[in-house]
Image: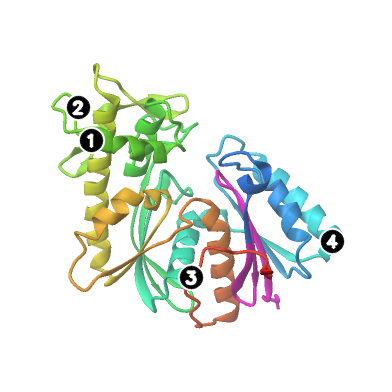
Amino acid sequence: MVSSNNILSYNCSHNAATCYLKDGKIDWFIEEERVSRKKHDHRPYLSLVDGVRRVDDIDLALHTTLHHSDEPELADRVLNFTCELIQKAKGKPNFMDCSAEHHLHHAALAFYNSGFEDAACLIVDGAGAYVDGGGHEVETIYKASYPHSFEKIYQRAVPWYKGSTLTDYTIGIGFVYAGISEYLGFGTLGCGKLMGLAPYGKEDPNVKPFLVDGEVDETLWERDPNGVKFKPYGDVSPANLAWRCQKDFETYMIALIKKASEVSNNIVLSGGCALNCVANYEYLKHLPEDAKLYVEPVSSDAGTAAGMAMYGWRNLTKSTEIYPLKDLYWGTQHEILL
């Protein structure tokens, strides 16, 4: 039987991170960019080295990657590195690949941090794991309850990703936002700058809506060697384009939140799209009566490292203990000398 007291987990995707779970609680959590000083770093080497030296024992090591990454061989390299690192320092723990459950890991972190006994977990991002039937998950709603039940109520997957051999393509709202961020020069991971630009814009009849009848207007996008990209259609104000993108993003997300509220009055939100704090505030104005909304602070892919560990621990122990998030510091406790 696998011992479950001490779990090390890490993710190989943008915003890589390493997490150590001890007796069901996060003992420490390190995002790679904090030690490598490379924004959104996707190679968790330094966080693994820094993390492993801090712990006494590792019973189980969990890892995940996104298979549409720019470095498909990265996961194998990091896994070999991790195996050698841990075996030299801590013996031979069990290793497990959890790459097929990207949205589930986002949901697990948000649900277990929320303090809710049960909830509808809404996960929305640019693209998650590859799913049966083709494409990558972009929207998922789970019905969650303790200790580890995550029933998939709704999911949408789209084949937009780099290297796809499919001639057709569709995109989710997360990639719409990332695509406009890329078009305006902020990069696909610079969506916070797009959010910051939006208030400087206004409604402009020259800017086409990104939604048609509540769905993404795919005529504004075209296939590209790197996936899909926005098709410019005239000289439009960047600020006004950002304003339109933000408003349509909010409209789309509000519809999804209402869909999630049909599953439970307790709603948790995670995935990259949950990082849009302007939209998060707007949702409060549209929540159904008696509904409660928890937005996971660590909604980037870094959070999947922690969610993976939490979900794994609950599966092994069947524990129903609730540990709501109390603060955002997951690290060594330091005594403050006054």
User: Which amino acid type is marked by label 2?
Assistant: Val
Q: Find residue 114 and report its image quarter.
A: bottom left
Residue 25: say if magenta.
yes
Q: Quadrant of residue 56?
A: bottom right
| Disc number placed over residue 205 in the picture, else none | none
Element on which disc 1 rests: helix
Q: Which mark is residue 325?
A: 3
Residue assigned mark 4: 89
Label 1 neighbourhood size at 10 Å, few (<14), some (14-19), many (20+)?
many
Bounds of the magenta segment:
1-28
Real-space Cα distance between discs 4 and 1?
Answer: 53 Å
Q: What amino acid type is highlighted by mark number 3?
A: Leu
Asked whether 84 or 336 is in front, the reply is 336
Q: Which residue is mark 1?
A: 244
Could you tell me how far apart the alpha carbons at marks 3 and 4 are, in whole angstroms?
31 Å
Mark nearest the camera among 3 and 2 is 3
Among numbered discs 1 and 2, the one appearing first in the sequence:
2
- Residue 214, given in percent of the width and then of the height, sits at 18, 45
Task: Say if the magenta span includes residue 68.
Answer: no
Vertical position of residue 37 compared to residue 308: above or below:
above
Callouts 3 and 2 close, C-beta under 8 Å? no
Image position, residue 126 (x, y; %): 41, 43
Task: Check disc 2 and report its element: helix, strand or loop.
Answer: loop
Please tell me which residue is depicted at 55% across the width and 43% down the height of the picture.
14
Q: CA distance from mark 4 to mark 2?
A: 58 Å
Question: Residue 87, how many percent across, how many down?
Answer: 83, 60
Under circle 4, the secondary element is: helix
Q: Secondary structure at mark 3?
A: loop
Is the Cβ of the residue at disc 1 closer than 8 Å to that at disc 2? Answer: yes
Mark 2 lies on residue: 207
Query: Where is the N terminus found, in terms of image quarters?
Result: bottom right
